[in-house]
Image (cartoon, helix red, strand yellow):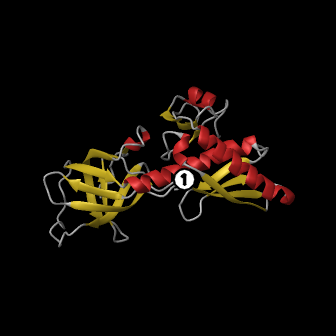
Amino acid sequence: MNTEVIPTKLDYYDNTLKLQSTSKLISFFKGDDGRRALILESTIFHPQGGGQPSDTGFIIVADSDFKFIVQDVRSRDGIVFHYGVIENSGGEFEMELEKGKEVRLWVDESRRKLNSRLHSAGHLLDVCMQKVGLGHLEPGKGYHFPDGPYVEYKGSVPQNELQSKTKELELEANALISRGGKVMVAVLPYEEASMLCGGCLPDYIPQGSTPRIVKLGDNPGCPCGGTHVSDISEIISMKVSQIRTKKGTTKVFYSVGS
């Protein structure tokens, strides 16, 4: 593989509702781990990261029978790798595909929507933590996979409050979902992004950069590179199943309705 590949343009940054697009082939190869991969000029496929699983779907090469089933998507040094298998190839596509070929991308809609709802619900929990008196907890990492999503916070909740706060969080989250509200996602200048996030950004965001911000309704925003719903109501409903505190870390476990 050519090591001079330029970073992949992330089309989902601009429109997370776009599920079909065109791009151009940069490279098609078999990696050291035996998996086949495509690198494209641009992509609407979200790579796994930020606690969110990758999109799946398929890619076809224009004017050919080549169909690539995308099973996993990863990003490394700004380059997005689409891993998968060739459908019904019978070995005829073992040759190197021509660089610059036009390709068409299709993202699995049901998986994208579920991932976006789970990810957005994690952000909504951050908002609700403030509203139920848990604003002293500092948001940390999140795990927004369907098999057991949670958001982790630095700090503790007294054991005798865990059950009551669990109920309060669920009630508050579902009240916000019922009211709804537009979800804004935009890449912004540092100062404007800071204002939308309550006047400051996390230390890991370099000053002078242009971070991507997600903002749920009238609530303060936060930096995020994932995919999200367009309105809070699209989360449908939330179940906060448990709050667990251990060694100065609090985890809030949740799920979304269907």
Q: Nearer the viewer, residue 21 or 7?
A: 21
Q: Position of residue 184 (x, y in %)?
A: 52, 34
Q: Position of residue 67 (x, y in %)?
A: 23, 60
Q: Residue at x 74, y 53 (%)?
A: 167
Q: Quadrant of residue 71?
A: bottom left
Q: Position of residue 187 (x, y in %)?
A: 48, 34
Question: Within 10 angstroms of label 1, few (less than 14), some, or many (20 or more) residues?
Answer: many
| 61 shown above or below 16 | below
Q: Which residue is mark 1?
A: 118
Q: Would you say residue 130 is visible in this rendering? A: yes
177 or 47: nearer the eye?
177
Percent from the top left, x then y, of residue 205? 59, 39
In this rendering, the count of numbered labels is 1
Which type of secondary structure does the marked residue at label 1 adopt? helix
Name the residue at the front extreme.
178
Q: Note whether 81 is above or below 13 in the view shown.
A: below
Quadrant (top left/top right/bottom left/bottom right) for the N terminus: bottom left
| Res 242 → quadrant | bottom right
* Residue 224 as seen in the image, left or right of residue 14: right
Q: Is residue 36 above or below residue 227?
A: below
Task: Please name the amino acid that badge 1 sits on.
Answer: Leu
**Is residue 76 visible in this depiction of the protein?**
no
